[in-house]
Image: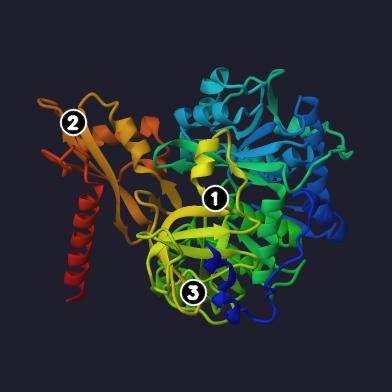
């Protein structure tokens, strides 16, 4: 491995404003909110559907929640699940849990009961803070978990008058749900709880380099989701790296579109934590809607918009895009999926800002590599490693460092790399070679130090920025009485990047429709994991020993897609 330690050709492309190494803050993540309240006390921390709060107010609310969590039994190291969409409560809960000494467990609000149950049991979370709309799912599984308390809030709780009165009616119309919650000593109203909390800081003895701030769950191709252990230092480091990469942005002055989910590590770091550190104003968007985003960028003069390719595609394809002034945008870093070159150029033309692609994983907090926003970049590349970050390619044939343009596994070493997987020492050990994290992604580095992705993890599907693991979807369908065999793959999709397709072999004499399979899947899987396409076959391609050849099906679909594209281009 010695070869990779000394060869860093990417450094030659760093502008003078980006240092090779950074003097990182050895402090807790929650200290950023306290710092923002001191430096920018009257500055607006966010705008949310007409409501705004200053940094001083957000810090006070987070302290009040922290003290109430403490009174409910949260001690240093206890896990607190947060199952919220992008809302003020998500920010307050995240920092409130940390201020109480807790470890945040971000939980996707789209999860179904089976997924919630697994995550709560595995993490051992004692308290969950959730939206009222998801509370019925939580209530159905809480007795199977270690959850001692559930704190419930709603979108309306942080809306100004009269929106707070009208919104429940809109919510019922859109979702068909009106949730009635019986509050008691174990189920609490967020607003009522926080209202009575103390604003006094809690004395904590936290070691930023070793103590966890976050358990961020990521799926696995060979089993249930794993909890990625990220320390305070991991997340502080990645936030400061992001700050240095965006060196032209001004602390206390920028306005950032907060449309990426905070429950996703990418949105958490590049939107929420970065904003809190630098005193930016977040325009919090609970659900991505192109029309609302276009209006918000123009109205609030947003300068920074981290996102996923589907978000930029959604804006570019909206018929009203030319009716809005998007010239305030300075910079965007795209992540979660490959960024098409055409989308990059069209978006830059529409905004006059810069849009570049980055790369990372949950295990790297998440960003490890990105293109320069203001500097030399290469089309199709994911860019250059960030400060203090070593990236190398391991040859698939020799297991040794690969040469320029040789495809192999991307490996990463740096202070933002995770501590390990929660309660999975063997999986942790298998994911490292010495102190290098093995990404499982295939790529190469050119002679100048620019990195390229050749293929994502062997079987993983990335649809609309969400990671979907085929085995999890397949296992659900194997519970269906009509299904004999199934293979799930990702097929090209011009909007979502990939979409989920299932190849199904039915049992002899069985009869089932696509709609019936879809209905079954939606009872057991989050909506983004449900196949959008089904193909019934008499048999699936297999090896001599009976293993299904997933790659054959992938290649067939890619060939079809290529043939269709060629036909459209004639």
Q: Is residue 418 left or right of residue 273?
A: left
Q: In this rendered view, identify the residue nearer to me: 58 or 475.
A: 475
> Looking at the image, can residue 491 be seen?
yes
Q: Residues within 10 Å of mark 1 (few under 14, many from 20)?
A: some
**Where is 61 relative to 377, above or below?**
above
> What secondary structure is marked by label 1?
helix
Q: Is disc 3 in contact with disc 1, using a CB cutoff of under 8 Å?
A: no
Q: Residues within 10 Å of mark 2 (few under 14, many from 20)?
A: few
Q: Residues within 10 Å of mark 3 (few under 14, many from 20)?
A: many
Coloring scheme of the render? rainbow
Find residue 498 and report its image quarter.
bottom left
Q: Percent x, y for residue 382?
A: 48, 69
> What secondary structure is marked by label 3?
loop
Q: Is residue 266 left or right of residue 191?
A: left
Q: Percent x, y for residue 492?
A: 30, 58
Marks 2, 1: nearer the viewer:
1
- Kindly identify the residue that appears in the image at 18 percent across and 31 percent down: 512
Mark 2 highlights which residue?
Answer: 512
Q: In this rendered view, identify the residue nearer to me: 516 or 412.
A: 412
Using the numbered discs, state the Cα–Cα distance from disc 3 to disc 1 in whole angstroms. 21 Å
Q: Earlier in the sequence, mark 3 or mark 2?
A: 3
Q: In this rendered view, identify the residue nearer to me: 388 or 326.
A: 388
Mark 3 highlights which residue?
Answer: 450
- Kindly identify the residue that appears in the image at 41 percent across and 64 percent down: 443
Q: Earlier in the sequence, mark 2 or mark 1?
A: 1
- Kindly identify the residue that appears in the image at 48 percent across and 54 percent down: 439
């Amino acid at each position: 491995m010695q070869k990779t330690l000394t060869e860093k050709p990417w450094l030659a492309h760093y502008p003078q404003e980006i240092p090779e190494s950074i003097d990182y803050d050895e402090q807790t993540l929650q200290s950023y909110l306290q710092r923002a309240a001191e430096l920018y006390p009257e500055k607006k921390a966010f705008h949310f559907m007409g409501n705004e709060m200053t940094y001083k107010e957000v810090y006070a609310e987070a302290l009040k929640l922290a003290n109430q969590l403490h009174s409910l039994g949260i001690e240093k190291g206890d896990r607190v699940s947060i199952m919220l969409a992008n809302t003020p409560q998500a920010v307050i809960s995240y920092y409130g849990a940390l201020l109480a000494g807790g470890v945040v467990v971000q939980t996707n609000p789209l999860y179904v009961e089976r997924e919630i149950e697994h995550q709560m049991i595995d993490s051992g979370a004692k308290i969950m803070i959730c939206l009222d709309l998801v509370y019925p799912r939580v209530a159905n599984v809480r007795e199977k978990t270690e959850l001692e308390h559930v704190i419930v809030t709603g979108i309306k709780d942080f809306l100004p008058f009269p929106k707070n009165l009208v919104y429940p009616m809109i919510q019922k119309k859109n979702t068909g749900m009106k949730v009635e919650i019986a509050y008691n000593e174990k189920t609490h109203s967020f607003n009522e709880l926080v209202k009575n909390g103390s604003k006094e800081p809690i004395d904590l003895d936290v070691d930023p380099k070793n103590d966890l701030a976050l358990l961020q769950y990521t799926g696995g191709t060979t089993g249930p989701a794993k909890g990625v252990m990220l320390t305070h230092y991991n997340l502080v480091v990645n936030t400061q790296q992001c700050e240095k990469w965006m060196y032209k942005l001004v602390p206390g002055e920028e306005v950032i579109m907060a449309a990426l989910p905070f429950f996703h590590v990418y949105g958490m770091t590049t939107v929420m934590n970065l904003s809190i550190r630098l005193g930016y104003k977040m325009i919090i968007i609970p659900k991505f809607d192109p029309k609302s985003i276009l209006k918000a960028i123009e109205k609030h003069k947003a300068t920074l918009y981290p996102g996923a390719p589907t978000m930029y595609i959604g804006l570019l394809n909206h018929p009203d895009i030319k009716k809005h002034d998007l010239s305030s945008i300075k910079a965007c870093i795209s992540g979660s999926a490959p960024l098409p070159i055409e989308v990059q150029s069209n978006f830059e033309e529409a905004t006059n800002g810069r849009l570049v692609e980055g790369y990372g994983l949950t295990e790297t907090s998440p960003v490890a590599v990105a293109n320069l926003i203001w500097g030399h970049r290469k089309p199709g590349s994911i860019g250059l490693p960030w400060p203090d970050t070593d990236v190398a390619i391991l040859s698939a044939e020799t297991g040794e460092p690969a040469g320029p343009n040789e495809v192999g596994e991307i490996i990463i070493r740096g202070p933002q790399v995770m501590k390990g997987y929660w309660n999975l020492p063997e999986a942790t050990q298998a994911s490292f070679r010495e102190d290098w994290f093995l990404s499982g992604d295939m790529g190469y580095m050119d002679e100048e130090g620019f990195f390229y992705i050749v293929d994502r993890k062997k079987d993983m599907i990335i649809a609309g920025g969400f990671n979907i693991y085929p085995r999890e979807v397949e296992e659900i369908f194997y519970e269906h009485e009509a299904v004999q065999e199934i293979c799930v793959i990702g097929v090209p999709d011009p909007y979502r990047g990939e979409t989920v397709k299932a190849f199904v072999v039915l049992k002899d004499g069985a009869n089932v429709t696509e709609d019936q399979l879809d209905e079954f899947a939606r009872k057991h899987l989050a909506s983004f994991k449900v196949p959008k396409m089904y193909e019934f076959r008499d048999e699936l391609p297999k090896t001599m020993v009976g293993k299904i050849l997933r790659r054959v099906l992938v290649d067939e679909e890619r060939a079809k897609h290529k043939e269709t594209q060629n036909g459209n281009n004639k």
